[in-house]
């Protein structure tokens, strides 16, 4: 019997390895395509870095990202490699780091090695993950790797390491904030002391120091996320959340949506801190998923990429709760739909030609945006219902 299990596990590993290689091949297919983010921003930044003394360029305000990513671009600028390729390779490497932490999270809960292999493989094969790095040239895999690592270490009771990782995630992108509701509820239920959270801004400020030392005003560096928010004031931006229904009936100011989200999180925290709700390790993973998919639904100005963490956690949800896998698949569809709509709108460049390598999926535009939004809301409600039901039926012996 043990030998049969070994053979089965071996077949799973071989299949997973082949699929992982296939995922890399698919990524390479997209490497020559140039998305507008690279054409008008990343490429310009790399050229500016090369023409202005590499690290010395940090003193200038040519970038609207946090300097953490610019440090990476400085290293890439020094390499005699086409920057489009080197940027995408960095994203690819972090795709695998994010997949590693997803698989580690799955194994932590399930203690199932096969589930660990399958979750790693699925995380590398997600269409949105592939498109984000290999076609968009985006770096969401970087902050996501550290964000998922943060929740993994938290559930391993390694609080300091968790906060360091979360601080690094914030040092790359503010989208790590979709995890804050989870961390808040974990804190008020006694899982972590409030003072550990001071590590996050400490790490963030530390990440700013090289740019500040080179001459960039500290105020500019601290307020970079505010500058990003002001860059696009639209409540709706290629993502089918609640604002496609209400944008014409509320003030066009993101602050109201942010305040609503904060109040909503406080209310949920007040409800879930009650002792009648029993949290197990599985419950916390479900809450992580809810945190990552509810925030993009209720926050204004969300773009297609802001579900990235939710997509990755969906893999863990699928592997840990296969009977509810259709809910996570629904979330992946909503996210992929948003990417395809965005691609259909902007296209990408191959040489000087604006093209769409996924033109065969243009029929996605025929799917009503509001219908997808309703699907999104329905999935959230079903996951919330299952989550609350599990809290009421969990046994004290498994409380975490």
Image: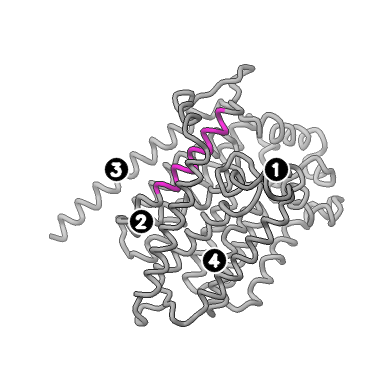
Which of disc 1 and disc 2 is earlier in sequence?
2
Q: In the image, what residue occupies the spot 60% across and 20% down? A: 354
Point out the image quarter for the C terminus: bottom left
Whichever of labels 4 and 1 marks the residue nearer the N terminus, that label is 4
The residue identified by callout 4 is 182
Horizontal and vertical percent position of residue 249: 67, 48
Give the residue number, with chain letter if any, for mark 1: 234
Q: Secondary structure at mark 2?
A: helix
Q: Which residue is mark 3?
A: 15
Quarter of the image with the N terminus in it: bottom left
Q: Main secondary structure of the magenta part?
A: helix
Of callouts 3 and 1, which one flags the residue occurring earlier in the amino acid sequence?
Answer: 3
Residue where numbered disc 2 is placed: 116
Is the Cβ of the residue at disc 4 closer than 8 Å to that at disc 3? no
The image's colouring method is one colour
As measured in the structure, the alpha-carbon distance from the residue carrying label 2 to the one carrying label 1 is 40 Å
Distance from Cα at disc 3 to Cα at disc 1: 44 Å
In the image, the segment drawn in magenta is 329-344
| Residue displayed at 57% across by 61% down | 179
The x and y percentages for residue 140 are 58, 46
């Amino acid at each position: 019997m043990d030998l049969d299990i070994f053979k089965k596990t071996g077949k799973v590993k071989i299949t997973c390895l082949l699929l992982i290689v296939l995922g890399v091949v698919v990524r390479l297919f997209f490497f020559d395509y140039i998305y507008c983010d690279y054409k008008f921003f990343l490429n310009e930044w790399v050229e500016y870095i090369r023409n202005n003394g590499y690290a010395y360029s940090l003193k200038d305000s040519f970038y609207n990202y946090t300097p953490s990513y610019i440090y990476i671009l400085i290293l890439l600028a020094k390499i005699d490699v086409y920057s489009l390729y080197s940027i995408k390779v960095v994203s690819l490497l972090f795709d695998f780091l994010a997949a590693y932490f997803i698989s580690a999270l799955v194994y932590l809960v399930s203690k199932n090695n096969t589930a660990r292999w399958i979750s790693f493989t699925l995380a590398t094969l997600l269409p949105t993950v592939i498109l984000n790095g290999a076609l968009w040239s985006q770096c969401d895999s970087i902050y996501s790797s550290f964000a998922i690592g943060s929740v993994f270490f938290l559930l391993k009771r390694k609080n300091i390491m968790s906060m360091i990782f979360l601080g690094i995630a914030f040092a790359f992108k503010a989208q790590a904030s979709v995890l804050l509701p989870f961390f808040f509820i974990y804190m008020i239920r006694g899982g972590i002391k409030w003072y550990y959270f001071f590590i996050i801004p400490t790490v963030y400020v530390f990440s700013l120091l090289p740019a500040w030392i080179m001459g960039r005003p500290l105020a500019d560096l601290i307020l970079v996320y505010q500058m990003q928010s002001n860059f696009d004031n639209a409540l709706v931006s290629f993502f089918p959340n609640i604002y496609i229904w209400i944008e014409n009936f509320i003030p066009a100011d993101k602050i109201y949506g942010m305040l609503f989200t904060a109040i909503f999180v406080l209310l949920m925290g007040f409800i879930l801190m009650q002792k009648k709700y029993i949290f197990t390790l599985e419950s916390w993973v479900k809450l992580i998923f809810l945190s990552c998919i509810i925030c993009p639904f209720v926050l204004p100005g969300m773009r297609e990429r802001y579900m990235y963490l939710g997509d990755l956690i969906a893999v863990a949800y699928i592997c840990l709760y296969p009977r509810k896998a259709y809910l996570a698949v629904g979330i992946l569809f909503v996210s992929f739909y948003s990417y395809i709509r965005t691609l259909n709108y902007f296209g990408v460049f191959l040489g000087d030609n604006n093209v769409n390598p996924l033109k065969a999926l243009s029929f996605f535009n025929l799917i009503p945006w509001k219908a997808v939004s309703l699907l999104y809301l329905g999935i959230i409600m079903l996951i919330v219902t299952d989550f609350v039901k599990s809290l009421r039926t969990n046994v004290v012996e498994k409380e975490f």
